[in-house]
Image (cartoon, rainbow, N blue to C red):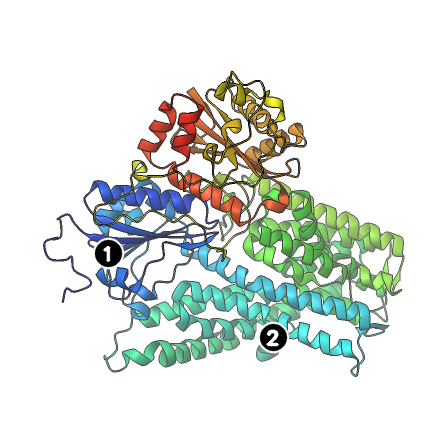
Amino acid sequence: MTSPADPPNGAGASGPGLKLLAVTACPTGIAHTYMAAEKLAQAAESLGHSMKVETQGSIGAENVLSDNDVSQADGIIIAADKDVDRSRFIGKRVLVVGVADGIHRPERLIEQVRNAPVYQGDGQKPQRGAASAASGDGKGRSVTYKALMNGVSYMIPFVVVGGLLIAVSLALGGDTTSKGIVIPDDSFWKTVNDIGSIGFALMIPALSGYIAYAIADRPALVPGMVGGWIAAHGELYDSEAGAGFIGAIVTGFLAGYLVLWIKRVKVPKFVQPIMPIIVIPIVATSALGLFFIYVLGEPISWVFERLTDWLGGLTGTSAALLGIILGLMIAFDMGGPVNKTAFLFGAGLVSKNPEVMGACAAAIPVPPLGQGLATLLRRRMFDDQERETGLAALFMGFFGITEGAIPFAAARPARVIPANMLGGAVAGAIAGVASVEDNVPHGGPIVAVLGAVGGVPMFFVAVVVGTAVTALVTIALMSLGGGGRGADADAAGAAEAVSLVPSPAGAPVLAGVGSGGGTGAASGAVADSSASGAVAASDAAALKTVSVSAAEPRGGGKAEAEAEAAPEAEAAPEVDAADQVLSGYLTGQTVKERLTADGKDAAIREMAELLAATGKVADTAELVRAAFAREDQGTTGLGEEIAIPHAKTDAVTAPVVGFARSPEGIEWGAPDGTKARLVFMIAVPEAAAGDEHLRILALLSRKLMGAEFRERLLGATDVGAILRVLGEIE
């Protein structure tokens, strides 16, 4: 039997005929995923190898690699900017690189996979970025980025569920007392509050655990979660405040890299089977827990005590200065030792000096309210998950749950934390100057609604102004970095999931909605290069069309594209199924042989007018505005002489796709410097921007990677010929 790590008979170290596999995935799961897949398949064909590519996109995994595929494979290339399960590839040569390398260096990857390290599961991981290192590129997503984003994505449900249950229980079952908003022990809402508290308590361990998991797989999950729990519970290391989400990030990375180090220790073969399930978790958990309690815990406790003493020395000084300091501390770590120091300091003075708690109460809701407001003001800067989290944060902020902003701060700390602190300082200063009083140890608008605040009007002024400052500063800082996650220079460097922004490798990420993998299966799959290497565009033998039960009217037949396709027609004929491609979204009516525009803005306007001829555009000007807004977030020029401007707006009543050519090319700001000669425009209503939208984007980006397909599209003689070429997109 051939060793899985060696090439098959007749395919030596440098010979042709290898059976290769690949997995491609990008954070948004749209354009880069399929562009890399197509480039790898084409490169394999040109080099005489067969390759099957699994794509893990936003519409789910396609062309999934079977056990039989893996068993026969001579090597596997993982070109991904997010975590890909490698357990099925044990014993195989595995090369792990960023998705950009799959697009720009497919031939080099195929050469390098022959000498890639053999993946040994939990015992050994292949070296990531071998191709990048060899090429001097090194621009793939870092382990730090992927690990942090993995932790944040798993943490968000705990934040939302726990926070909302606590907020609802406080609103419907809470009573205002001198000890704060208290829910009677025998109340139904007390049970709801307890359930929410459990969810909230698991938030920090989930963040830490899944950071560790992303670094070192399953053996790191337990030490990561236990470490996060220790970080969140200061009583374990004699501190009144836990280390919060910052401590969880620290324990997550410590656990992950500790487990990686333990994996490298050589052990006898009889011990190896129990290493990942017994030895590694026990050793790593014990070591990390003891280290945090006895080494890191003491400094945290010391900081807490010194801050408390320092704040005590500030009482009696300027109310504005004290309010600024308390606001900065409240907003800094949102539940960590600095936040808790300020809160407990204010709570301890409720009976003697309620103005101190008043400043705290005004600052407490600012981080979640500010981040939630930012997601409403600039929706395109945030992905679907963040927008949903933003709505939950608004709700939590109203009830004084500062932790509602943690997902945003964890994802992009260098932008969000300063914005939170600035807003908190403004709110605290206004409340301090106005001598706002809070007679209960709680914060947020809820305490004013329940009558616990003295100076209600100025309290709300402080909250509103602080919230606005946080939201606007967050947007400004994100815009300075290029907009959204894709340009964030934080430790995360997280990729924006709803914008078309340049990736670190210079190629834009065409994004639709959401992040992560959807579960819907798409009808199209990445072409499987079998032994004959079949990935040519000319292999499509039939057009895939979608019939419609009743054709839509075509606006009197006066559209320019219609006149080009059938100049002799006095009245527009019904749309025939043979004239439809891309599930009927693109028809002869939305095809234009030649754009008259010579600039990007003019081209977008011309394409919008082309789509408007279908009757599916209720407001052409608004469609143009939405398309321009998308361009402001980053170019939609993909390179390879392709541009795909697109917009999600209720200015269109149904999804519609247009296509036009520009023989001279239009400068679109593509990363490869090419001018756009093939221009597609996609417009969908907000409600329709789901799996179908993603499927169309995926199909387009995948098929357009074929140079021969693009040449035939440019050379098509008329609208009918263009439709026949586009009909091959399946």
Disc on res. 44? none
Q: Position of residue 263 (x, y in %)?
A: 32, 71
Disc 2: which residue: 234
Q: Please name the amino acid that badge 2 sits on.
A: Gly
Q: Earlier in the sequence, mark 2 or mark 1?
A: 1
Residue at horizontal 29 percent and vertical 60 percent from the top: 126
Q: Amino acid at mark 1?
A: Gly
Q: Residues within 10 Å of mark 2 (few under 14, many from 20)?
A: many
Any part of residue 341 in sight: no
Q: Where 186 sits versus 647, above or below?
A: below
The residue sitting at 15% across, 47% down in the picture is: 16
Instruction: Pick whichever, 542 or 397, lies toward us.
Output: 542
Q: Is residue 156 visible?
A: yes
Whole-number angstrom distance, CA of label 2 to CA of label 1: 48 Å
Residue 634 image offset from top left, x and y in percent: 52, 36
Q: Is residue 176 above or below residue 604?
A: below
Question: Which residue was labeled with disc 1?
Answer: 75
